Amino acid sequence: MDTSVQKKKLGLKDRYAAMTRGLGWQTSYQPMDKVFPYDKYEGIKIHDWDKWEDPFRLTMDAYWKYQGEKEKKLYAVIDAFAQNNGQLSISDARYVNALKVFIQGVTPLEYMAHRGFAHVGRHFTGEGARVACQMQSIDELRHFQTEMHALSHYNKYFNGLHNSIHWYDRVWYLSVPKSFFEDAATGGPFEFLTAVSFSFEYVLTNLLFVPFMSGAAYNGDMSTVTFGFSAQSDESRHMTLGIECIKFMLEQDPDNVPIVQRWIDKWFWRGYRLLSIVAMMQDYMLPNRVMSWRESWEMYVEQNGGALFKDLARYGIRKPKGWDQACEGKDHISHQTFAVFYNYNAAAPIHTWVPTEEEMGWLSEKYPETFDKYYRPRWDYWREQAAKGNRFYNKTLPMLCTTCQIPMIFTEPGDATKICYRESDYLGDKYHFCSDHCKEIFDNEPEKFVQSWLPPQQVYQGNCFKPDADPTKEGFDPLMALLDYYNLNVGRDNFDFEGSEDQKNFAAWRGEVLQGEAK
């Protein structure tokens, strides 16, 4: 009989090594550089991939165990929310419009991140980096699925949630988040990690998943807050991956420093522009507010980010270009962004409204130097016009920034009365930008951004109508044809919240009488 042999249990460090580097091998009939062709062409020099260490030393077998426990708890809350008609417990039906923006503009990004990390992980020579990217890819797919599951409950009761993936590809404002991830995914693997894992996840993601999810809880939406905080525990790991990626590149070779700095400059600004939508949601679309966008920015970016870049200074990394302008913009971007949505609400599958006097009082308190001076007069005027039957809808198509694809709404640094406008010439054509930093990003790689799919230009070229549309036909209405291309239910998914089906249904479910209706 064979003698049984007691196998020694591996420690955490050895187990991690066995489940990462221990799974790798050197190719024999093809050179390694041919099998992994993408992790060198960006100019990043890696001398020792074994220096890549996951601080969590998370391996795939442990990952399934941890995430399985989280899923059980998450879906228990989601199921309980649905069974108890949780949609009736939210503070105000207006709040659901924030969820509409979330499922339209944030949830598809989770799937893009899933695809991006799967692709990037395949193309790293180092096994540790491949495993870390693989697990983050699965994380992002989970986030997409849990967000869709949680928000699908609201789709049973409210308009504007039923067609988010289709809208992501077509609706004008959704080209902003879409272009961000397509820009990142079409870069190299190290740029993708800098863009998503560091600039977005580490520096900026807290602005989405902490204050907004706290706002969800404060508005009675326990389903959303549960998936938000479930995702946030993953984000903590992703943030660690982001900072480790940056430090790994910087420690490997001094020649990597200027390349990484240029990427940080670019992706901090691109992320900041993308989050203008989140700023609007936080300041204007949460009936019960937790904190302002300005307060969130000061806490999670100026304080935390400031400390981060002090730490990175020893590697030769400075704060990103645009840092000061972004910190100044905290007083403006939420007001400017919501004003655009109010203007173009006819072509958006959400409802908008003029803030109440109480809400404008809160905005005045949170933005004492800017709101009353620049933005309250605008809302007062629009309210007066609406009361006279002249609700203002902008029927022209706006000029977009070629880089961030946001309408040209942002103002000059130091002058909130003047729209910021920059332009560049490339191969005989003129391109427009909302800031010096968007212009600089374009100028560094114009061959990439000249391919931008800009909705107004596409509409004017006739590329945003269904195949059977005939612009030459008498009575042809281009706006209605565009909304048909969007698959938008006119009068249900768009226009003002006041008088909408969502408002009327919510009041009926709760036995409330709307102003002007008989009891």
Image: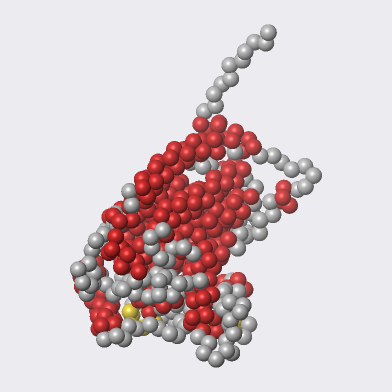
Residue 518 visible in the shown view: yes
Query: From where the camera sits, is residue 98 visible?
Result: no
Q: Please, is residue 31 above or below residue 372 in the view? A: above
| Residue name at image x 43 percent, y 85 percent | 395
Instruction: Please indicate whether residue 14 sits to the left or right of residue 509 in the image.
Output: right
Residue 217 x/y as whole percent: 30, 53
The quarter holding residue 25 reads: top right
| Quadrant location of the C terminus in the rendered image | bottom left
Q: Residue furthest front?
A: 519
- Residue name at image x 66 percent, y 59 percent: 41
Depth check: 502 or 409 in front? 502
Colour scheme of the rendered structure:
secondary structure
Residue at 64%, 54% in the rendered image: 39
Q: Nearer the viewer, residue 511 or 72?
A: 511
Asked where in the image residue 293 lies, by quadrant, the reply is bottom left
Tell me what residue is drawn at x 51 percent, y 71 percent.
487
Asked whether 181 or 222 is in front, the reply is: 222
Q: Where in the figure is residue 164, as x and y percent of width and height?
A: 48, 64
In this view, the residue in front, 445 or 518, is 518
Q: With respect to residue 433, does 307 lie above or below?
A: above
Relative to 287, say whether 434 is above or below. Answer: below
Which residue is situated farthest in the right direction here?
A: 29
Count of numbered marks: 0
Residue 169: image location, x then y, percent: 54, 68
Q: Furthest residue to the top? A: 1
Q: Quadrant of the N terminus?
A: top right
Location of residue 10 in the rendering, given as x and y in whole percent from the top left corner: 54, 26
